Amino acid sequence: MDIVFVIDGSSDTQPDAFERMKSLMMTMVNISIVASGHVQFAAILFNEKADVQFQLNQFWTKMEIHKAIFQMQPLGGTADITHALNQAKQVLATDKGGRKAQGTSQFVIVMTNVEARDLIQQQLMDDFRKSEITVITVRTPRSNEAFLRIEGANEPDLSFQRSDAMRQIMNSILQQICEKTKPDCELQEADIVFLVDGSTSIYHEDFRLMKFFLKNLTNVFPVDPNKFQFGLAQFSTGYQKVVELNDFATKIPLLRKIEAMAQLTGDTYIGLALKETADLFTKKAGSRKSSGVPQYLLVITDGESTDRVVDSAEQIRQDNINIFAVGVKNASRPQLLQISGLSENIFYVENFEALDTTKRRVIRSVCTSKADCIIDIAIGIDVSSLKQLQTTPSSQLKMQMHLNSIIDRMLDLHNISCKGGHSLNMRVDFHKSNMEITDFTSIDSRRELSLQGAHLNADYLLSFLNKFKTYSKKHWKIIVIFTDGIDDHMESLKEASHTLRHDGVNALIVVPLETKSTDNFSELEFGRGFGYRNKLRIDMPDIGNALMSEIETVAERQCCQVCCMCPGQLGARGLQGERGPYGNAGQKGSRGYAGEDGTMGSRGPVGVTGAQGADGCQGPRGFKGSRGYRGAKVNIFSSLTNSPSNVFCFYYGECLVTADHLVNRSPVV
């Protein structure tokens, strides 16, 4: 923390009072750890002017500070505390050694012999509050009398009129500093949602104390879209959403919204409220869960829920949200355990007056939680040498389905030893090349697997670093590569693998797609622990389970500091499950290629004779025929005489010759 003493050296301060002030400063220095990473001190002596005695980053030993305080002497003249406080604000600036940007708590302790409250301008106090600087005023008119005030707070002055007044005032100052000091927090960012009980069983004054507790908690953390975000909801018979995570980017309006929250009244339905609160942890509401930011839900209640809480609470925990349960008065301890899932996440107090005493424990639990153990898995697919996959679409589809089933099983890791009832936070993405770097997503919303674009060479291995540097940062990093063989010199690949390990990748696991591959992939792998001798193959019947065990080994080592596990032998394979329901119809496929021409078919049967057609047009006169053969001679007359009819006739040239002509030898007309 940064502490600036502002000492009244005017003629209003008697010599004995001035010595008491110096003694108080030395006592505070003695009980502090003076170092750049712990407590820094500065001092300002004022009358109508403000004289900086030493800066925050000027002395690093208690002896040097003691010497500087011992040499301080009264200035005389009149007191101008406003000018001194403005000077104190400058001393706390970053260029003078202040560490506000690092989240360090800052205090100004004003020591005077007169009532200073009326001398401090309200606007100046508002500026200090906005800057999150706590001003403590100490007045010691006599050796057996002392008064302490926290400027800007609603609490009355603390008064001590005993022989040990200075010791009492010192203890009070230390208590106030401890209350206002921001704890050392490993977390740099988090999304925190408060879910508070507004039922009728809570009195109006108790509801006010609960809001005061929420504001004190919020005050500890820096409110910023890139640091800590806060949400708020209230429940009774119904549910009320008050603040979403992305509603406020600064602290002051958020605190005002908390203060303005009105009590709902009604019965206690925590199960319903938990179910509804899940909407506050969505991207639309401002949650940064997909980016790996830790998620917290703090539930405060004074009674037992009317409805079931187990299912709703379990669903929230399975979504990688840590639940803390604060029980007051008549709250059910077994139900608090059902809500939080872990006994260490339960806080219980007898009444709402004692609620603020849990603040430090809640903050410590949030800041030391293991929820920031996030594993990012980058998956590479190299099928550049499998010609069958490049020419046969059906083979590609089969390989995709097979790899998807393996990856599904590989990512089916829910718990590790140090996570208790909470799900392991894993993110995954497929990595193609350095030209296409995408963010990690949750397992359920991962991108579609692609068999295009990767070659197992040194450049491809090193391209994983850019992906991790862009999107992973402090998370644990695992690379899993399915490959048909190396596409580079082994020495280049080994050098790239060494670079990956040196730059923070925790494991590289290679699975050959060709069972007869002679490449020694174990020379590239690292981070597999004691299982490095077991060669992984795509045709292993339990390859998905084997990969899951590899990831579990890394998770236990990095998240839980467990270097060796003895999981035992795998159990017998279970019975085949029931046939699942049919999936939804897929999208219509593209039009296929035209097939080859078929052979000619056999001749069909003769059809039915059709109707006679109409007469055609008369054709042209034909050519004259050839002379016919000479006929045989006959006795025409005897033939005609014996004929039963004498009406026979025939043509001879153009003259008609009848039987009468021939028989009667009549002339031919």
Image (cartoon, rainbow, N blue to C red):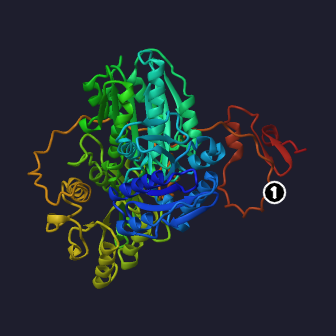
Residue 615 image position (x, y, % from top left): 76, 42
Q: Residue at x 14, y 65 (%)?
A: 530
Pointer 1 residue? 621
Tell me, yes or no, if residue 219 can be seen here.
Answer: yes
Q: Position of residue 398 (x, y in %)?
A: 34, 56
Please name whichever residue, 307 or 527, is drawn nearer the observer in this view of the structure. 307
Q: Nearer the viewer, residue 320 or 305?
A: 305
Amino acid, disc 1: Arg
Residue 39: x and y, percent? 39, 60
Q: Quadrant of the N terminus?
A: bottom left
Q: Is residue 447 visible?
A: no
Tell me which residue sits at (81%, 49%) in the image: 618
In the displayed orientation, state which residue is furthest to the front: 15
Residue neighbourhood size for the residue with mark 1, other residues' Cα within 10 Å, grouped as few (<14), some (14–19), many (≥20): few
Q: Does 421 sit left or right of 265 as displayed?
A: left
Q: Quadrant of the C terminus?
A: top right
